[in-house]
Image: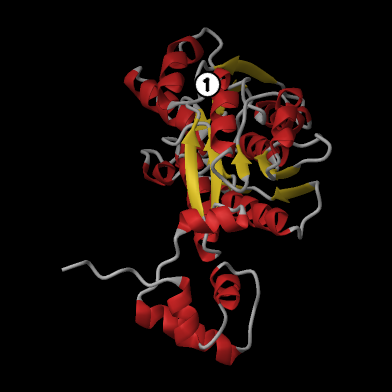
Amino acid sequence: MSAKRPPTIRDVAAAAGVSTATVSKFINGLQHFTPEVEQRLAAAISSLGYRLNQQARSMVTGQTRTFGLAVQDVRNPHFANIIKGANRVALEHDYNLLVVDVQERAAHERHLLEALSGRVDGLIVSSRLPDESLLWLSELGKPVVFFGRRDAPGIRCVRTDGHRAAYMLGRHLVETGRRRITYLGFPAARWDGERLAGLTEALAESGLSAQAHAVEMPTMEGGQREASALLLASQRPDAVVCYNDLIAIGLMHEAQSLGIRVPEDVAIAGFDDVPVAAYMHPALTTVNMRSEEQGEAAMRLLLDAVRGDAQDASDILLEPRLVPRASTARVG
C-alpha cells in the first residue's frame, strides 16, 4: 500500500477555485486579494494540510525568509536580550533568525559573516571590525544593519546614546559624594570611547577627572582579574564605573573577597541593566541600554530594507535610562 502523497499547490488551487499563480502569490506574501478569496485560500490550505516547501519557495522567490544576527558573546545577557527583541519582530513577520556568536574574536568575524550572508536575506551585525574593514559587506548584495556604528556614511545603524549614559552615571556618582572615580573599560569595543568621554565630561563639570584602566575581556572574569590592582592600590578609587555589568559584577565579587565593602569603601556601577544586576548584594547601579529595544529596532529597519521601504542610511538613537541602586548609595 503506497503512502498518501502530500498535497500540492495544484490541489490547493483546485479546492479554492483559483489559479496556481494566485496560490503562489498568496502563500509567498507577494500580493493581497479580496477577503473572500483569501478566506477560501486559507480554508483550502488548512483542510488539505498543505505545507509550504521552503526550499522550493526560496528557489522561486530568491528569498530564504531568514535573517542573520551576529553578536559578540551570546552568553552576555545584553546580547541575549538583543536576540530576544530581534527574534520577536522576526517571528511576527514570518521570518526565522539565524544567530552567530563570534565569541569576541575579531579575527574570525569576516569568515563567519561571509558564511552567514549566503544563507540569509539580510544581516544584523555587532562587530569589532573598523568601518573600513567592513566595506566588503556592501558587496555581498544583502542589506545590513549595524549596532553602534555612528559617523559611518551610507549605513543603517541602531544604537543607544553611550555618551549620555555615562554622563548620567558620572553626575549620579558626584551627587552621592564620590570624588576619586575610575573607569574600567574595554577599549576594543566600539562604544568604549564614548562612555569614557561622557564620564569625563560629567566629572569635569565638578572639577574632577577620571582615571582609566582596562580589562582584557568584557566578562565577570575580566572584572575579577583587575580587582586587586585597582582596589588595593595606595590611591584606591572611591567609585568605579565599569564598561558593562558583567565586569562590574566580577569586580564587586572580588572586592568583597578582598574585604572591601560596597558601597562603603567603593561604589561600583556598570552598563546594560542585565537581569541579575537587580539581585546582586548590594544591587548593582547601572544604565539600561535598551537591549531588547535595540534588537526590535534593528529588525524593523532590516525588514524595511528588504522590502525596499527604507533609505540606504538610517541612524536610530535610543535614550538610556539610569537605574540607581544600592551599590552606589551615599555613605557617611
Disc 1 is placed on an element classified as loop
State the residue in front, 92 or 164: 92
Q: Is residue 75 above or below residue 86?
A: above
Coordinates of residue 255 in the picture (x, y in percent): 40, 22
Whether residue 277 can be seen here: yes
- The type of residue carrying mark 1 is Arg
State the residue in front, 168 or 299: 299
Coordinates of residue 100 in the picture (x, y in percent): 49, 36
Q: Is residue 197 left or right of residue 98?
A: right
Q: Quickly name the residue at label 1.
A: 105
Q: Is residue 125 left or right of residue 277?
A: right
Residue at 78% across / 32% down in the picture?
205
Looking at the image, the residue that sits furthest to the left is 1
| Neighbours of disc 1 within 10 Å: few (<14), some (14-19), many (20+) | few
Q: Quadrant of the N terminus?
A: bottom left
Residue at 39% across / 43% down in the picture?
276
State the residue in front, 245 or 131: 131
Looking at the image, the residue that sits furthest to the front is 1
Q: Is residue 302 left or right of residue 207?
A: left
Whether residue 238 can be seen here: no
Residue at 68% across / 54% down in the picture?
306
State the residue in front, 98 or 298: 98
Looking at the image, the residue that sits furthest to the right is 153
